[in-house]
Image (tube, rainbow, N blue to C red):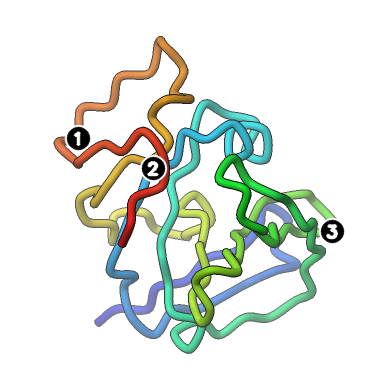
Amino acid sequence: MEEISGGCLCGAVRYRLKALPPKISVCHCTHCQKSSGSAFSVNLLTPEADIELSGDMAVYEDRGDSGNILKRYFCPRCGSPMGSHNLLRPGMFILRAGTLDDTRVLQRVALQCWTRSRQPWVKLTCDAPEFSQAPKI
């Protein structure tokens, strides 16, 4: 397997992945829209043990649309959102796919969640299952 790496815009935060994350999801919740500055976020559900991280990240504790506590991590220098921890999924890190150095390693999207908050002009062409809220996985 070729190296899978990524980082923030300014390069102060870098990471390497030991394996390709098994799940790629698109989240349309209002909190992902605000934290990304976009219409949705593309996330990689990654075991923490598979991430080698360098650099310091800042954290913002958020209560998502679901009511769950989410710790959102970002670069304190350039502000790039790096990912989050959902306290209901210990041992997993939700990595922002846009931080990858080479996104060609990504496979197909596994699911879209919080579609009830999707912007009306967003129409993705993937055939992933859609959930109006967070799926029970």
Discs 3/1, front: 1
- Give the quarter of the figure containing the N terminus: bottom left
| Amino acid at dot 2 | Val
Pick whichever, 115 or 3, lies toward us: 115
Looking at the image, which residue is at 51% across and 62% down?
Answer: 95
Locate residue 36, reporting x and y percent: 62, 38
Locate residue 23, reporting x and y percent: 30, 62
CB contact under 8 Å: marks 1 and 2: yes
Q: Residue furthest right?
A: 77
Relative to 34, is 100 on the left or the right? left
Locate residue 85, reporting x and y percent: 60, 66
Q: SS of the residue at dot 1? A: loop
Q: Residues within 10 Å of mark 3 (few under 14, many from 20)?
A: some
Between the residue at mark 1 and the residue at mark 2, the CA separation in whole angstroms equals 10 Å
Q: SS of the residue at dot 2? A: strand
| Amino acid at dot 3 | Pro
